[in-house]
Image (tube, rainbow, N blue to C red):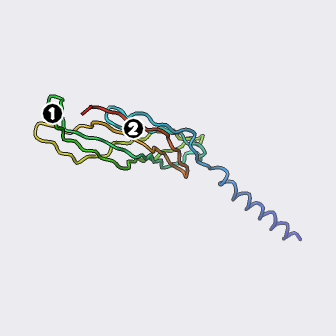
Amino acid sequence: MRKIGIIAVLSMLVVALAAVPALAQNPHFLRASASGPNAAGNLAVNFKIAGLGDNETITVTATADATAVYGCQNRGGNFPSDPKKTTVSGPVSASGEFTSGQNGQVSGSLTLRPPATTLTCPSGQRVVLVSVSYTNVQVSGGGDTASIPGTFSRTFFNI
């Protein structure tokens, strides 16, 4: 009878200890936002995650669909009457490692950059970013994803 009691107590102890880690960590975004694009065409994605353990390192990734227009500008800052330009579209992303404090939270920022171009300009001209736009912005980490609604765009030159 005593053996059965000991086995029952040990079994309940194992079940109770197995449930603790599942309850202790539940990563989730408290907030996520984006700002920009800045003068370089970059979009800052800001976030705060809670529900992590103390001093836990987590990988956070920001993604978006981006469209960038590049053009050839002459030394005088003008664009030829028949400007050479190209549009580049595609997914962009940025990732980083962040470590939570004793409160199990992480606040951070990631930078999304415009998609690169292969445009080459004639002699005496240089490639410049004409405009950039970001849509479908998301941030993910720890098994959670937060969508940031809206279109974030900036026009640098009207050509």
Q: Position of residue 9 (x, y in %)?
A: 81, 63
In the rendered image of this protein, does residue 63 appear above or below residue 31?
below
For mark 1, does the 10 Å Cα neighbourhood hold few (<14), some (14 to 19), or many (20 or more) residues? Answer: some
Residue 31's tag is: none
For mark 2, does the 10 Å Cα neighbourhood hold few (<14), some (14 to 19), or many (20 or more) residues? Answer: many
Q: Where is residue 78 in the image (x, y as percent from the top left)?
A: 18, 30
Whole-number angstrom distance, CA of label 2 to CA of label 1? 27 Å
Amino acid type, residue under disc 2 in the picture: Leu
Judge left or right: residue 80 versus residue 24.
left
Amino acid type, residue under disc 1 in the picture: Asn
In the rendered image of this protein, does residue 6 appear above or below residue 148?
below
Residue that mark 1 sits on: 74
Residue that mark 2 sits on: 43
Q: Where is residue 66 in the image (x, y as percent from the top left)?
A: 37, 44
User: Which residue is painted at 16% across and 34% down in the image?
Assistant: 81
Q: In the rendered structure, are the residues bearing label 2 and label 1 in contact, judged by CB atoms less than 8 Å apart?
A: no
Earlier sequence position, callout 2 versus callout 1: 2
What secondary structure is marked by label 2? strand
Q: State the quadrant of the N terminus.
A: bottom right
